[in-house]
Image (cartoon, grey):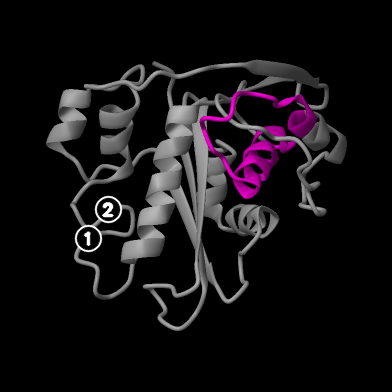
Amino acid sequence: MTSPRARWWSCAWLAPALGLVLALALAGCDLAGLPGDGGTPGSDSAALQACLDAMEPPESTEASESERTLACLIATHEDQGRAEMLYRSDLGQIARRRAQDMAARGYYGGADHPYPAHVDHDGFGPDYYVCIDAYEPTGWSCDLVVADPQRNTTESIGMGTNGLLSTPEQQFSAWLDSPGHRSHVLAESAGFSPATRYGVGHAHTADSPDQPGKSGDYWVFLAAPPP
């Protein structure tokens, strides 16, 4: 298994209402000057802005403004069930590549795609890429994951066309309105609580392969247990 070099920084703040310490660590991006949460339900605008203001890592991650905003919306939501959230650049890069691949090859779940929605045209799901391109999470056997390459225990995805779900606030709200996605993103199910390392990805295309002739925005949230 290969593991790319990960550069880390972290900030932590107390969420008194939850009695939790939320920690966010991000490698490789500049998060200055990002917009607020746009009134996303459950978001604390002060905590969100503090998260954005505190992030001043190196440039190599190349995380976009929309990705960084979504990262903070997830980490600072009042109902976040994880005791801590640490953003890893390697998971962010996987999530971004997944979003870009969906925007290019159209495997969001269209009728012409031969695999489930979370499996790309090469037959690989997100857990496979966590093992191959990042690290072996605690409690996993990456040998077993590689033997079952379509496995998904880590990823939520979203897609909108012609301006629908084109902002991180819109996509985050859509995940919160979907019981299955909300359970994953906010770890409302105890089974997701150990997945405290995460990344997000976003890609935009002028011509969606899933709905030709329409623009498309593709979003990925990826969360795994620590190494």
Quadrant where the C terminus sits is top left
Q: How many marks?
A: 2
Residue 222, image x and y in percent? 45, 39
The residue labelled by disc 1 is 115
Residue at coordinates 61% horizontally, 57% vertically from top-left? 171
Residue 41, image x and y in percent? 77, 51
Toward the right, the furthest residue is 46
- Can you say whether 108 is above or below 169 in the image? below
Residue at coordinates 54% horizontally, 68% vertically from top-left? 160
Q: Is residue 33 visible?
A: yes
> Which amino acid lies under the numbered mark 2 shown in the image of this protein?
Val
Q: Is residue 46 left or right of residue 31?
A: right
Q: Residues within 10 Å of mark 2 (few under 14, many from 20)?
A: many
Residue 112 position by quadrant: bottom left
Q: Secondary structure at mark 2?
A: loop
Q: Is residue 141 left or right of residue 40?
A: left
Q: Are marks 1 and 2 in contact (CB under 8 Å)?
A: yes
Instruction: Name the foreground residue: 121 vs 140.
Output: 121
The reply to whether the magenta stretch includes residue 154 is no
Q: Is residue 149 left or right of residue 67?
A: left
Q: Is residue 190 visible?
A: no
The residue labelled by disc 2 is 119
Q: CA distance from mark 1 to mark 2?
A: 6 Å
> Which amino acid lies under the numbered mark 1 shown in the image of this protein?
Tyr
Residue 119, image x and y in percent? 27, 53
- Can you say whether 49 is above or below 120 in the image? above
Quadrant where the N terminus sits is top left
Instruction: Name the foreground residue: 7 vs 51.
Output: 7
Q: In this picture, which residue range is highlighted in magenta?
A: 51-79
Q: Residues within 10 Å of mark 1 (few under 14, many from 20)?
A: some
